[in-house]
Image (spheres, grey):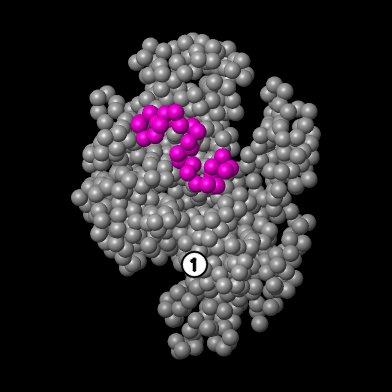
Amino acid sequence: MGRKEDNIKKATEIMDNLDGIRNIAIAAHIDHGKTTFSDNLLAGAGMMSEELAGDQRALDFDEEEQARGITINSASASMVHTFDGNDYLINLIDTPGHVDFGGDVTRAMRAVDGCIILVCAVEGPMPQTETVVRQALREKVQPTLFINKVDRLINELKVTPQQMQERFVKHINKVNQLINANLPKEFKGKWGVRIEDGTVMFGSAYHNWGMSVPYMQKSGMNFNRIFELCNAGDEKTLAKEAPIAEVVLDTVVRSLPSPAKAQDYRIRHIWHGDHDSQAGVDMREAKAKGVTTFMVTKIMMDPHAGEIAVGRLFSGSLTRGNELFIAGTKTKNRVQQVGVMIGSDRIAVDKITAGNIAAVTGLKDAMAGMTLTSDPEMEPFERIVHVSDPVVTVAVEAKHMRDLPKLVDTLRSVAKGDPSLVLSINQETGENLMSGMGELHLEIIQHRIERDYNLEIIASNPIVVYRETVQGASPQPFEGKSPNRHNRFYITAEPLDEAIIKGLHDNEIPSDAKKNAKELEQTLSHEYGWEKDMAKKVKAIDGTCMLVDGTKGIQYLHETFELIIEGFKEVVKAGPKAGEPMQGVLFKLTDAKLHEDAVHRGPAQVIPAVRNACYGAVTVAKPLLIEPMQKAVVTTPDEVMGNATREFQSRRGLIQDMEQEGDSTTITAKCPVAEMFGFAGAIRSATGGRAIWSTENLGFEILDMGLQDKVTKEIRERKGLKPEPYDASYYAE
C-alpha cells in the first residue's frame, strides 16, 4: 500500500476521535502564495509527490485557475499528521485571494474552526488580508499567521538578520491590530498571534521550508542558521532541516482548536435555534450518534457523479442511503455516496462522523449556504454574511435560440454553487440578469457556463448595481389608495441609522421579525437605543430595510398584514427612482382604513395600495442613488507615480494616502466601482506594467449630487422605463 492510500486508511480511523481532528482554512491576499503553501502541506503529509509540490497546484485544479495562475474556487483536502506520537486528521481548505471571490472565503470559514493567515514578507498585510481576517473572526475562527516569501527578503532586498526581525515585528503588529479590531468580546486578550507561542510561523512555501519558535527549540535551529543557508542559496538543506509541512502542521495541532472545543462556542454564534434542544446539544458536543446536521458550503460539478455538496458535518453521521431534510422545508434528499476531498479527487468512504468536512452526492436540492438535517423541525443555520454584495451585472442570453430552455436551467445550476451570484429577470425586457462581485467574477462564471455546461452565451458589457435610499424623513404620512378606493394606507419613510444598517447587514440584528420577535425587540432596545414600544412593532425586515406598525386598534389590520408585508417587499426590491434595490430605509405604517368585507381587501387591492404609499413616502423624502465603492491600493516606482495618480483622478478617485518606501510609493484611493471597469489594463499601461495593485470593496456611498439625474436617466432608459421618475402625485392617484 502506498503512502497516500495508507494515509487515507488512517484518516478514516481518526474521524471518530474528535480531539484528533483539525478543520482549517488558508486565507490571504492574492499572490501571497496560498496554493504553493497548501501543496507543500499535502506533499509533507504524503498526499502528493514532493517534487511536484508548488508546480502541480493540486488545489487549483480548475482549468481557469491553471490558465490564470490564481485561485478562483475554495478547494479542500484531508491529510494525516503525526505529532507527539499521535495521528491527527487535518481537513484543509485553500481559499481564493482575489476580492471578486471573497464569497468563497466566507463560506469556507463556516466549515472550519481555525485558519492560517498568509502574509508576504515583502508586501506585508494588504487590503484582502484585512478582509480575510474580518471574515474569519466574524465566523469565530481562530487565526494563526505564516509570513511567507522570506527568501525574497534575504535574496532580493538583501536585509540583515536584524532588519528581517524588525520587518516581522511590523507585520505581526499590523495583523494583531486587525485581529483586535474585529475580535469577538469573549476572545479579547485570548486570541492573537505571537512569536513565543508558535502562532507566528515564517518561511518560504516555494522553497518548502518553515520555522516557528517551538520548532527552533525542538530542532536547535536559529535565525542566523536560516539566514546563512538562505544567503548561500542552499534552501534544499533548509527544507530538509525545517520542512514546512512539519512546522505548520505541528502548529495547527498545538494551537488551533478541535471540533470538540470549537463547536461549543461556534454553534452558539452561527445557529439561533433552541440551544437546549436535542439538535442544539448534539451540535455543541459534536455527537456522532446525534441529530445529523450538515452545512453545505460549496457545490461542485462532477461530470460523472453530478453535483457534489461539500460542507461541515456538525453532528450525527453520514452514510449512503441517509435521508436528510433541507432545514426550513419538507424537501427530502437521499445520500448516494459520502467521501473526503483531496483537491479534485473524491475518495469514497463508508461513513463520515460529526466534526469533519464531507463531500456528499445525491443532495440534488441543496445549495451552498443550506442546512441539511435528519430533524424536519430543526432551525437552519444563520445565513452566511458576505463581506460585500453583488455590485456588477451582465445580461446573458443564449447564442442559439434552441438553447433558451437550457440557459435557465444552467443559470440556476451555477447559482446553486455560488450564492454570491444573484440571478434575476428584467420584467420589461425579459433579459436574464446575472449580478456578481466584480468583472472577473462574472467573466469566470461565463467561461464556466460555456465549458462545463457546453452552452454558448452572449453577455452584455458589465453595468454597476446601484442602490436607492432617502435623504430625509417624509414630512407627513403618504396616502396609498387601493384600486377599488375602499382601503387606504398611510406610510412614512425615513433613513435608518448607520449602526442599524450595519447590524442588519452583518446579521447582528435578527432578520426574521416574526420568528425572532423577542430577540429583535431586545437587540433594538438594548443595543441600538430604540424605544421598547417601537422595537416591539417591527413587522418585517428585508435586506437593510424595515417595516414598523405604528397604528393602534385598527380593525381587520392583523389579518391584512401579510399582504402589507408583500407590498413592502416589492418596494424594497425596486425603488421608485430607478428601479434599483432599496437600502437603509425605515417604513412606518401610521394609519389604515380597511373595508369590513374581506373580499374587498384581497391581494389585488392591498398590495398596490401599500406599494403606492411606500413609493410616495420615498418620493417626498427625496430619494437618492448610492453607488458601490472600492478601495484601490497601488504600489508603483516613483518615476511613474504621477501616471498612477492621474489614472485615479480620471476615475473620480479620491486619494486618501501616499506612503513612500525606498524608490516606490504606495497610493491608497477610494473609487466608484462604476469607474473601475478596465482598470487592470489601464494601470498596467500607465505604469509600463510596473505597478502592483489590489482592490477591496468598501460598501455604498451617496452618488455625487451632480450625477444623480444623469445616472438615474441612464438606468431607467436601460430598463425600458420612461426617463424621468414619477413625482409624488402619480402615487396619490
Residue 732: image quadrant is bottom right
Residue 605 seen anywhere in this rendered image of the structure: yes
| Percent coordinates x, y for residue 603 in the rendering | 49, 81
Depicted 356 relative to depicted 609: above or below: above
Residue 10: image quadrant is top left
**Where are the magenta residues, as a range?**
40-69
Is residue 695 or residue 352 the one in the foreground?
Answer: 352
Residue 166 seen anywhere in this rendered image of the structure: no
Q: Main secondary structure of the magenta part?
A: loop
Which residue position is annotated with label 1? 409
Judged left or right of residue 719, residue 2 is left
Depicted 310 relative to depicted 409: above or below: above
Residue farthest toward the front in the current orientation of the protein: 1
Instruction: Find out whether residue 30 is within the magenta segment.
Output: no
Is residue 39 or residue 487 the one in the foreground?
Answer: 39
Residue farthest toward the left in the current orientation of the protein: 289
Element at badge 1? helix
| Percent coordinates x, y for residue 146 in the rendering | 47, 28
**Total numbered badges shown on the rendered structure:** 1
Q: Residue at x 49, y 67 (%)?
A: 409
| Percent coordinates x, y for residue 354 in the rendering | 27, 46
Depicted 551 relative to depicted 232: above or below: below
Judged left or right of residue 365, residue 609 is right
Q: Residue at x 52, y 47 (%)?
A: 63
Is residue 215 or residue 167 the one in the foreground?
Answer: 215
Judged left or right of residue 336, residue 540 is right
Quadrant location of the C terminus in the rendered image: bottom right
Quadrant location of the N terminus in the rendered image: top left
Which amino acid lies under the numbered mark 1 shown in the image of this protein?
Asp
Q: Residue at x 51, y 66 (%)?
A: 547
| Percent coordinates x, y for residue 45 in the rendering | 35, 31
- The local crowd at label 1, few if under 14, some if 14 to 19, many if 20 or more residues have their Cα within 10 Å, is few
